[in-house]
Image (tube, rainbow, N blue to C red):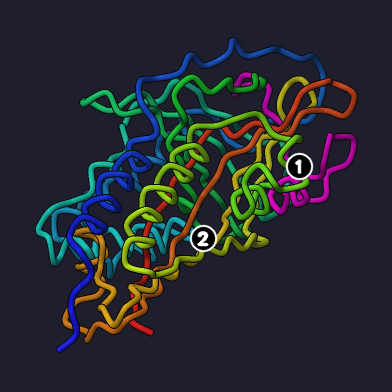
């Protein structure tokens, strides 16, 4: 029978992984919103946004209490549907809801679009949680005139992140597109570039385009910690980051864009020397279940990132202001 992956490797993955999961700390100050004059009107009132959001939160609470992901499609879409489904699937095995899935009911800012066409989105920033986890940035999306708004994406704001200012809800903010011009990069290009930075670190040709951020630092620390344990057993690891077209964009008051996007990643760990590669956290164990371990394991993640892309000529770099990382699949290879 083959030997199992040393416990110290698993422990390193768990402890460093928790650092990434806890990347967002206390609340960030929300910039004072700016007021413009004439222009298009917002598609919703703030009271309507609250009614939509509370409907979604009520359904999520019921799903959490039942630890049942079956009802999530009623109120979720996009990357958040996959993230939350994974969280509840894990909860069924661990009998514990991930604290990072908590969404405060109160808000500190609501950004309502003036774009009358579909699909369209609202960006909402919550307060901090009762246990002082960071504020959540929610993306509520409506696909067409006859569909309900769903929670498309959620990120936790990074501690100390500098958020852009937006117009007040009664004025409304313009939605933008993934191909928006007049910025240091289009939103789509910014997401592609950041995926390359996650993949290649400081050696990426795009690294100079981004401010440092805690998400990337924690991910690098995790990778380095795991590498030490893997090398001791002559194993290997690779991570691949793939940008997607799941992108929502809102224009800030200064003409930049706040971009929320999904980047998929796969982490392949080879134990080496005839050992078995085992799940490295409670979440991975829950998703792996009773499957038979082999020398290689592939772990899939959904990474949801919020990036601020400044105007061209602003002398600012792209900055990551929020992030969420969730394991969604664990398979032996």
Q: Which is more N-terminal, label 2 or label 1?
A: 2
| Residue at image location 67% in from the left, 27% down from the top | 172
| Residue at image location 71% in from the left, 48% down from the top | 204
The location of residue 317, given as percent across then percent down, is 74, 28
**Residue highlighted by disc 1:** 176
**Residue highlighted by disc 2:** 78
Magenta region: 168-193
Does residue 114 sit above or below 30 in this rendering?
Answer: below
Q: Which residue is at the front of the view, 286 or 124?
A: 286
Q: Which circle marks residue 92 in the picture? A: none
Tell me which corner region of the image, top left, top right, bottom left or bottom right, holds residue 57: top left
Alpha carbon separation for disc pair 1 and 2:
18 Å
How dense is the environment of label 1, judged by Cα within 10 Å: few (below 14), some, or many (20 and up)? many
| Residue at image location 72% in from the left, 49% down from the top | 193
The location of residue 64, given as percent across then percent down, is 20, 54
The location of residue 98, given as percent across then percent down, is 23, 48
- Is 177 on the left or on the right of 304, as rendered? right
- Please, what secondary structure does the residue beneath circle 1 have? loop
Q: Which residue is at the front of the view, 228 or 245?
A: 228
- Is 17 on the left or on the right of 43, as rendered? left
- Please, what secondary structure does the residue beneath circle 2 have? helix
Asked if the stretch drawn in magenta spans residue 290, the answer is no
Image quarter (top left, top right, bottom left or bottom right) of the C terminus: bottom left
Q: Which residue is at the front of the view, 139 or 209?
A: 209
Asked if the stretch drawn in magenta spans residue 182, the answer is yes
How dense is the environment of label 2, judged by Cα within 10 Å: few (below 14), some, or many (20 and up)? some
Q: Which residue is at the front of the view, 286 or 53?
A: 286
């Amino acid at each position: 029978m083959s030997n199992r992956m040393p416990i110290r490797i698993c422990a390193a993955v768990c402890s460093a992984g928790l650092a990434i999961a806890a990347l967002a700390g206390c609340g960030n100050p929300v910039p004072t919103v700016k007021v413009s004059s004439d222009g298009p009107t917002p598609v919703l009132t703030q009271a309507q946004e609250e009614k939509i959001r509370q409907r979604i939160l009520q359904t999520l609470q019921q799903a959490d209490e039942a630890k049942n992901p079956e009802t999530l499609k009623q109120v979720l879409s996009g990357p958040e549907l996959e993230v939350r489904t994974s969280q509840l699937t894990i909860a069924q095995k661990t009998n514990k809801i991930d604290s990072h899935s908590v969404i405060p009911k109160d808000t500190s800012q609501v950004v309502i679009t003036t774009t009358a066409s579909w699909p369209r989105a609202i960006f909402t920033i919550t307060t901090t949680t009762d246990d002082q986890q960071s504020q959540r940035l929610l993306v509520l999306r409506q696909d067409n005139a006859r569909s309900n708004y769903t929670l498309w994406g959620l990120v936790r704001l990074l501690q100390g992140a500098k958020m852009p200012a937006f117009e007040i809800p009664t004025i409304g903010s313009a939605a933008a597109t993934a191909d928006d011009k007049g910025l240091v990069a289009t939103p789509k290009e910014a997401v592609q570039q950041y995926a390359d930075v996650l993949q290649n670190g400081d050696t990426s040709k795009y690294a100079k385009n981004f401010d440092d951020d805690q998400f990337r630092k924690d991910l690098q620390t995790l990778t380095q910690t795991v590498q030490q344990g893997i090398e001791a057993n002559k194993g290997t690891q690779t991570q691949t980051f793939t940008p997607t077209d799941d992108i929502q964009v809102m224009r800030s008051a200064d003409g930049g864009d706040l971009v929320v996007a999904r980047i998929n990643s796969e982490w392949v760990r080879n134990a080496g020397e005839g050992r078995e590669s085992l799940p490295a956290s409670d979440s991975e164990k829950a998703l792996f279940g009773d499957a038979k371990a082999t020398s290689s394991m592939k772990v899939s993640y959904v990474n949801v990132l919020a990036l601020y892309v400044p105007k061209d000529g602003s002398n600012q770099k792209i900055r990551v202001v929020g992030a969420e990382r969730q394991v969604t699949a664990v398979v032996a290879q």
